[in-house]
């Protein structure tokens, strides 16, 4: 086949590489399952690569070039895509997030990245990187705020966040920063841009005591779940596992305060912070 044109990784790279993969596979007369078999992955996994909901890893790119005779095209572009502004464990999740039609997230400790203000993000990054330079912190904050641009659309993606009450009470960056951060949440909820719930301390033990959870649904691909820990993260695509995590989120929503009561609580805590004496 002719050597495909290299893609510009700055312009929707995963979607374009996925389209090229579909074209090359179909030109070779292979089904998704046919291509997946020598890679030891399912046909649905190939479909996720082609739809852009999964990131093409280098080991697969090399084998795909061999199988489809694409002369190193996928390897070259995969290496270009590897230069990301996000930590390695979060790259694939961040790219999937940008393509999602709906995002549901449970946050036990911090305001979710998509909902953070610059001041909150800066305080969070500085707390976790006490020896980082000012420029390094600036770059991290810029990348965090850039992700939030997906909320510029008035309706898509649907974003539903369940926050543990600890998120509201932990004073990240001080009272001024927290007041601004919580007021930002209130503004998004009042504009009906997000669904916001708070899981109160009074609820006691619950189904997600083990950590955070992000669920991402897509218009033309299976849903994904992302689980994150200290310096690590895992994207889960097994339909059975994702269904279990969806039930977990449903149970969290059932235990949390209704949206109207949640909004009132967030407003009240923000008001408390705004009236605290400043040093």
Image: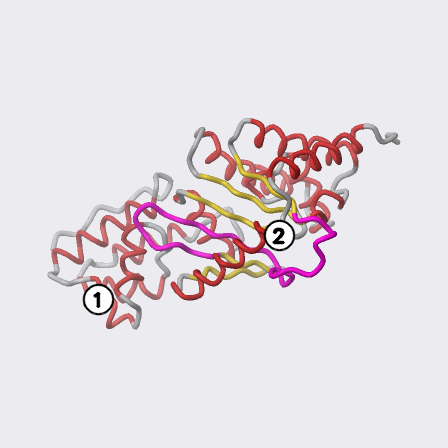
Viewed as shown, does residue 199 lie left or right of 193? Answer: right
Q: Which quarter of the image is occupied by the C terminus?
A: top right
Q: Which of 257/68 is in front?
A: 257
How far across and down, in percent of the image, does residue 87 sit? 53, 53
Q: Find residue 270 and report its image quarter.
A: top right
Q: Which residue carries the number 2 mark?
A: 255
Q: How many marks?
A: 2
Q: Is residue 152 above or below residue 57?
A: above
Tell me the residue at 15%/63% (across/down): 30
Viewed as shown, does residue 239 lie left or right of 255? Answer: left
| Disc ID at residue 200 | none
Tell me the residue at 35%/57% (across/down): 56
Tell me the residue at 31%/69% (across/down): 41
How far across and down, in percent of the image, does residue 64 sit? 25, 63
Magenta segment: does it hold 204? yes
Magenta region: 199-225
Q: Which residue carries the number 1 mark?
A: 33
Q: Which of 3/87 is in front?
A: 87
Q: CA distance from mark 1 to mark 2?
A: 41 Å
Classify mark 1: residues with Cα within 10 Å, few (<14), some (14-19) or many (20+): some
Tag 2's secondary structure?
helix
Tag 1's secondary structure?
helix
Viewed as shown, does residue 235 lie left or right of 61? Answer: right
How far across and down, in percent of the image, does residue 4 sit? 19, 49
Q: Which of 191/112 is in front?
A: 191
Q: Find residue 236 and report its image quarter.
A: bottom left
Q: Find residue 161 and report its image quarter.
A: top right
How far across and down, in percent of the image, does residue 73 sit? 25, 54
């Amino acid at each position: 086949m002719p050597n495909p044109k290299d893609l510009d990784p700055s312009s929707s790279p995963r979607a374009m590489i996925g389209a090229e993969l579909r074209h090359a596979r179909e030109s070779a007369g292979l089904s998704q399952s046919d291509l997946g078999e020598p890679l030891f992955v399912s046909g649905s996994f190939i479909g996720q690569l082609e739809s852009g909901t999964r990131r093409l890893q280098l080991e697969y790119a090399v084998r795909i070039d061999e199988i489809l005779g694409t002369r190193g095209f996928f390897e070259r572009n995969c290496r270009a895509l590897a230069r990301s502004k996000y930590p390695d464990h979060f790259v694939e999740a961040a790219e999937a997030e940008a393509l999602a039609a709906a995002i549901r997230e449970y946050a036990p400790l911090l305001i979710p990245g998509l909902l953070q203000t610059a001041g909150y993000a800066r305080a969070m990054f500085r707390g976790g990187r006490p020896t980082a330079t000012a420029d390094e912190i600036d770059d991290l904050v810029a990348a965090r705020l850039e992700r939030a641009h997906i909320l510029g659309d008035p309706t898509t993606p649907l974003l539903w966040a369940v926050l543990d009450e600890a998120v509201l009470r932990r004073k990240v960056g001080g009272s001024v920063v927290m007041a601004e951060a919580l007021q930002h949440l209130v503004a998004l909820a009042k504009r009906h841009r997000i669904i916001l719930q708070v899981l109160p301390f009074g609820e006691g033990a619950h189904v997600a005591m083990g950590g955070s959870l992000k669920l991402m649904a897509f218009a033309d691909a299976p849903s994904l779940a992302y689980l994150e820990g200290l310096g690590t993260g895992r994207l889960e695509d097994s339909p059975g596992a994702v269904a279990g995590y969806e039930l977990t989120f449903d149970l969290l929503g059932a235990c949390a305060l209704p949206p109207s009561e949640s909004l009132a609580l967030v407003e009240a805590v923000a008001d408390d912070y705004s009236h605290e004496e400043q040093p």
